[in-house]
Image (cartoon, grey):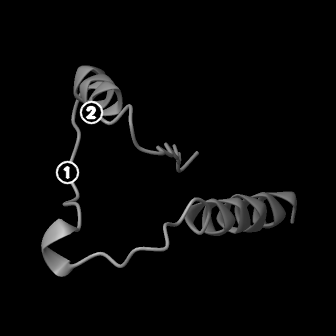
Amino acid sequence: MIRAGMVALVAAVALTASGCGGSSTKTSASSQQQLTDLHTISQLQTAFQTASDQPRLIVLLSPT
């Protein structure tokens, strides 16, 4: 029961955070960012540091 509550809390926080910091300008389909699979920590670190001028959110989920 506690696990289900924790999952619901994490989902609510993620949904709330994804709506924060929006801009009033519309984005076109060509300016949307592409998702990238990361396989190593160094790839994550590089991507994180490259986007230092943008809001960033890292969510780590574990099946255990």
What is the x, y in percent for residue 28? 22, 79
Badge 1 amino acid: Thr
Q: Residues within 10 Å of mark 1 (few under 14, many from 20)?
A: few
Residue 60 in the figure: left or right of residue 51: right
Q: Quadrant of the N terminus?
A: bottom right
* Quarter holding residue 49: top left
Question: Which element carries disc 2, helix, strand or loop?
Answer: helix
- Dot 1 corresponds to which residue? 36
* Quarter holding residue 25: bottom left
* Quarter holding residue 21: bottom right
First of labels 1, 2 by sequence position:
1
Residue 24 in the figure: left or right of residue 53: right
Badge 2 amino acid: Ala
31 w.r.t. 64: above or below? below
Q: Residues within 10 Å of mark 2 (few under 14, many from 20)?
A: few
Q: CA distance from mark 1 to mark 2?
A: 10 Å
As rendered, which of 4 and 58 lies closer to the eye?
Answer: 58
Question: Which element carries disc 1, helix, strand or loop?
Answer: loop
User: Which residue is situated farthest in the right direction here?
Assistant: 2
Q: Residue at x 38, y 31 (%)?
A: 52
What is the x, y in percent for residue 19? 59, 69
Q: Mark 1–mark 2 contact, CB under 8 Å? A: yes
5 w.r.t. 45: above or below? below
As rendered, which of 31 and 6 lies closer to the eye?
Answer: 31
- Dot 2 corresponds to which residue? 47
5 w.r.t. 58: above or below? below
Q: Residue at x 63, y 59 (%)?
A: 17
Q: Quadrant of the C terminus?
A: top right
What is the x, y in percent for residue 57? 51, 46
